[in-house]
Amino acid sequence: MSIAETPAAAKAELKIVEDATCTFCGCVCDDIDLYVDGHTIVEAKRACVLGKAWFLNHEIEDRPSCTIEGQPATVEEGIDRAARILTEAKYPIIYGLSDSPVEAQRVAVSIADWIGGNIDTTTSVCHGPSGMAFQGVGEVTCSLGEVRNRGDMIIFWGSNPAESHPRHFTKYSLMPKGMFLPNGRKDRKCVIVDVRKTKSARAADLFIQIKPRRDFEGLWTLRALAQGLSLDAEVIEEETGVPLDTWRRMMDWMMAAKFGVIFFGMGLTMTRGKHCNSEALLALTRDMNKYTRFTCKPNRGHGNVTGADNVVSWRTGYPFGVNHARGYPRFNPGEYTTSDTLARREADAAMIIASDPMANFSQPAREHLASIPYIALDPKETPTTRHAAVAFTVATYGINTGGTVYRMDDVPIPLRPAFESPHPSDFDVLSGIERRVLELQRQ
């Protein structure tokens, strides 16, 4: 039964959580009104289809808060066993964090420091190349509020927000009427560059279907046009699959913009070229600022993956894949990133936080993870929790616990939980593990 069909007397008894924050995707919409009946959310006003599924399908699993080797145990026993696994290991790794609040992420980084292990986030398998490119080229950035109020030229490259971030168009980038864009969509130009015609392409004024794995060539074509260089039309069309006149048309629109924004996704970062693609796009954005105001932002997926990048960067100086074995942080993607340390069978213990590598890592990495003792924290039962030496069932952030998350534009957003969970929060569990690690190291 929807809230509209609920009798008036029952409606009055519902708990209403105003301006709740949805942590499903990187948009982190913080204008959701939740109607709560006990431990059930019956309506999520203003949430998108993904947000409604996130809230309305939420159930607290009837599982022990902790299991050791598959057998129920107290949280205290699990914390002691987890701390011993991590302190006795020679090469421990900590991975995940993208679906945890900032407060828990900070504790996880501290644990990695105390045990001399690796700390890595899911960024390493999605927007990791962007993090590498930011260090090499820099980033011209802005908030989503600026996009809403000023962005008159919106480009999506390798990103499909119509399906991955359903409120992106309506809340931030294309449809809203802004302070300097009183007519909303009519005041904006939109270009979408992708290898296939996605649902997002329907919203574009210009859709450019680039050849697969030719993003680098396309971006450098635009950089050359921005510099006024002459190009061979046949070569450009052969290399990118797009006529030179189409690239010129796009560049003319970019030059005419007052405030341009490029959003890019994994279609750019995880194809051939990887961080070189991201560097080319960041350099293009920088080039455009000779003529007008242009910014770029990655379209991030998980609710607090941006927060994970921020926290690890504050604490170590690097965004992901950081090693503390020598007593100071070292950054080297490919060497210290989790999928690689597992595939090479280097790690001898692990702690997996709010992620499921057993479901999406390579076969060699999954096999090695199953062969070593590891700890898993997750609100749901997953292939990763089922194989864990110690598994904690934790409360869901944003629904059962508060804290802070970061929107994809690096703006911190507070969480307003709907109801409590009988399970501990990941912050509580990680804080307990940190305290026990320090006790064991002092012995």
Image (cartoon, rainbow, N blue to C red):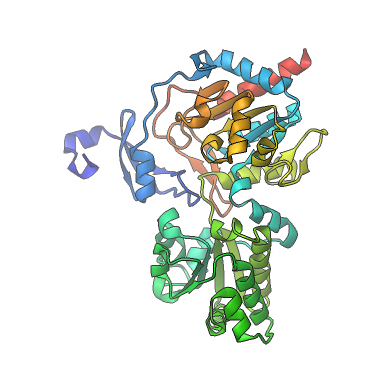
Quarter of the picture containing the N terminus is top left
Give the vertical position of 310 relative to 327 (above or below). Answer: below
Position of 211 with respect to 165 (left or right) is: right
Quarter of the picture containing the C terminus is top right
The answer to whether residue 96 shows anywhere in this view is no
The answer to whether residue 399 shows anywhere in this view is yes
Residue at image coords 43%, 21%: 422
Position of 16 with respect to 137 (left or right) is: left
Residue at image coords 60%, 67%: 215
Image quadrant where residue 313 sits: top right
Give the vertical position of 1 relative to 424 (above or below). Answer: below
Q: Position of residue 303 (x, y in %)?
A: 50, 45
Give the vertical position of 179 relative to 64 (above or below). Answer: below
Residue at image coords 43%, 75%: 205
Image quadrant where residue 400 sits: top left
Q: Position of residue 133 (x, y in %)?
A: 69, 58
Residue at image coords 61%, 75%: 239
Q: Position of residue 116 (x, y in %)?
A: 76, 30
Give the vertical position of 52 relative to 72 (above or below). Answer: below
Given residues 152 and 296, the one toward you in this image is 296
Q: How many marks?
A: 0
Given residues 339 and 178, the one toward you in this image is 339
Q: Position of residue 112 (x, y in %)?
A: 70, 31
